[in-house]
Image (tube, helix red, strand yellow):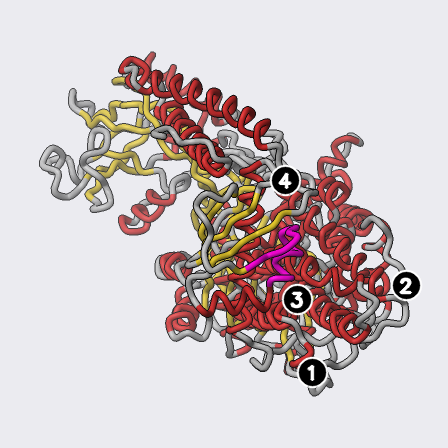
Amino acid sequence: MEIDTQYRPESVEERWYAEWVGRGLFEASPGSARPPFCMVIPPPNVTGSLHMGHVLVYTLHDVVARWRRMQGRDVLWLPGTDHAGIATQMVVERSLAEEGKDRHSLGREAFEKRVWEWKEAYGRRITDSLRGLGASCDWTRERFTLDEGLSRAVRAVFVRLYHEGLIYRDRYIVQWCPRCHTAISDLETIHQEVAGKLYTIRYPAADGGPQGIDVATTRPETMLGDTAVAVHPDDERYQAWVGKMLRLPLAERPIPVRADPFVDPAFGTGAVKVTPAHDPNDFEIARRQGLPSVVILDTQARMTAETGEFAGLDRVEARARVVRRLEEQGFLVGIRDHVHAVGHCQRCGTAIEPLLSTQWFVRVAPLAAPAIAAVEEGRISFVPASWSKTYFEWMRNVHDWCISRQLWWGHRIPAWYCDRCGHVEVAETEPQGCSRCGGPLRQDEDVLDTWFSSALWPFSTLGWPGRTPELERYYPTDLLITGFDIIFFWVARMIMLGLRFMHDVPFRTVYIHGLVRDAQGQKMSKSKGNAVDPEDVHRRYGTDAVRFTMAILAAPGNDIPLAPERMDGYRAFANKLWNACRFVRMRIGDDAVRAPYRREELSLADRWILSALEREVAEIDAALEQYRFDRAADSLYHFVWHEFCDWYIECVKPDLLKAEDARRTQVVRSVLLDVLDTILRLLHPFMPFITEELWQKLPHEGEFLATAAWPRTDGKRLDPESERAMELVQEIVVKVRNLRAEAGIDPARTVEVLVHPGADSTAAVLEGQGALIATLARASAVRVAERIEQGLVAVRGMVRDAEVAVLLAGVLDLDAERARLRKEMARAESDLAATAQKLANALFLSRAPAAVVQRERDLEREIQDRKSRIERTLAALGEPGPSG
């Protein structure tokens, strides 16, 4: 079966993936006797398309899945997608807006139908991209967070937590996005430094006296919702004011002065306005002080009727109007520039608005304690371990989790309200009527935070709350691979709810990968124009090269600076592998088999490559066990390119071309096939398509490489003595090649080489491997000499204890070569003088950038090295050196 002259990924990838899936190679077997290994996919948003971060995380997943499958494990890599409440609703609402419609004009039922239609039309894009990446998921078990089975799990968890007192409904300050029209969690709020103003406002005494208190604020428009002014209890400036009343400017209502330890006396004037409905810290002060709340901003960030003349104004417009009124009425003391952090919605970038609202919350502290213990006790390990500190920091300072969202797309909250008696029914299935009064019920309009359903992903996808064979066999899962940016959103919540409902951790290991950035380390984004399109690089370089690039760059926890050109090198690597296999295939013939061979039939090169391969298998296993994908890929790259292709194949080419020694040729063919078979198995998890294609073209046992056995080591092929001998051979060959290049010898010319060994062990290697060295160094002969005469016309060098000489007589026109080298010497001396003059110039050294000066110094060293090489070659040609 011939191998084409060129590797064309597009003709291979789709064909093999269809074959693998069609034959069910990736399907898990709950009844199997093989030990299980399970991973759940971090579910991508159904709105999305694959980006390079996805390519990284799913490549690493697939490397592990294929490796474990070849090791004989019953692998379940469970795929699926997330309904992504806010993101998906926004996409569909934008589509409706283009038609001049909105969700309210459609109504809830019609809107939900429209979103499902959108999901069916576009939701498969990202899973198709996963297939294109070669992801060996069990697609028969694909899940979606709004599937009926997962929805049942969500309702069951909500109801149980509610009846256990861990879910409650309360009027509380939340982070509100006026654009998305929903509450968002603190974790979905990004705080950005903003250049704003600090306004100082005089709050006069309520009794009409001449005194008052100056209050500093960044948000003068919210003063209309103030219900107190607070000062620190130990601030002597205001102790006489505590308990007295002030008059709220513009609103003309009395408010008290209260002492509270939260106040920072050093900020502003040391007195702060308390606006409980619109600031989380003020809300807590109001709770401690028993203060009322006045809502002055609505869900669209517009002023409410409570604000009188300002009602209906947008918050930005209201600020300007309030400041103008304060100035007109003499209450504005001053304005100064002030940089401060402002929360923005992670999803849409709008400045969030703290808002007093009735929402549903999870009481997190009781869930956090066992989740902290699970990591402390080592039942869950983070890789790298340093990320556990980040996890602990968040978990030990956790706040209750607002889980209700004012959306229509998502898991509707399973709570029903009786307007007749005020009772709240929380149930897994819809009640027929109020259990207290029999009256009609209406369901809560809100849906659950998307992270609530994805927090159940490791067990809801396996059939919980039922007791399924999959749940019994595959939970807890073995490994989670994810980014550090969702340790809080997802990892911690999976641990908390897994422990609560499954009474065991959801996974044993959490591998944290970094972010994929551009070549300069900047975050990729379409707006910056530095984003890399996965489909583009897949077409340009081939999927295997893209995957190998991501794996070799994936140092645990580190961000990945990605220049697409890096993939060029790994495309070249794929071509190198292809050409090596093609060469072997051409030389072994159509009826070749891997015949057994005895150790005594093996050459030094055979014993060396088999020993090196044994070490390689052990190294790859160790690297993958430690999730050092980068080390495994790098080691494979160097072994295949250098040890196998550059050295071993070159060593045995003469044996493959000789017809007189049939047995030797057969042994070489068998060793080549053994090594290639192992290389393809080791590479398969990283480069599945090209390795499957090549494996099928070579003699092999089994039907698919994707399910072939992973190579094992028993140490029997280890041969340190052969490795040491081959290392010496390689060093001598490299020295001869360098000396040839230094002397300017045509690569096609053969040369005679003399080697004077300084030790018996070196002599033994030379005597046994002279012919091999000669072949690799293009030498007519390699002779061992008792000594090398000083007057010999030759270029010389040292390799360990051995002197190596390449004879030049009859190889070069010595007179012409001396003339050429003298010209080279003159040019080098001129360049050196110019560089030295520049570096002796004090003005240049003081004014030029450090990098420019360093470049000149590096250039000086480079020219000096060139001059030294020319001097050595001239001396070898019989011309005296500079002191001669």
Q: Position of residue 137 (x, y in %)?
A: 72, 65
- Which comes sooner in the sequence, label 1 or label 3? 1
| Foreground label between 3 and 4 | 4
Which residue in the structure is indicated by mark 1? Answer: 598
Q: Is residue 444 visible?
A: no
Q: Tell me the kind of residue under disc 3.
A: Leu
Mark 1–mark 2 contact, CB under 8 Å? no
Q: Reading the chain from its start, which is encountered first: label 2 or label 4?
A: 2
Percent across and percent down for residue 12 are: 84, 55
Q: CA separation, marks 2 and 3? A: 23 Å
Q: Is residue 751 left or right of residue 11?
A: left
Q: Earlier in the sequence, mark 1 or mark 2?
A: 2
Depth check, front residue: 647 or 783: 783
Residue ID for mark 4: 811
The local crowd at label 1, few if under 14, some if 14 to 19, many if 20 or more residues have their Cα within 10 Å, is few
- For marks 1 and 4 on the same chain, the one whose residue lies earlier in the sequence: 1
**Which region is colored magenta?**
770-783
Q: Which residue is mark 2?
A: 1
- Label 3 belongs to which residue? 682
Q: Residue at x 59, y 57 (%)?
A: 782
In the image shown, does 384 or 324 lie closer to the viewer? 384
Q: Is residue 73 left or right of residue 212?
A: right
Magenta segment: does it hold 782? Answer: yes
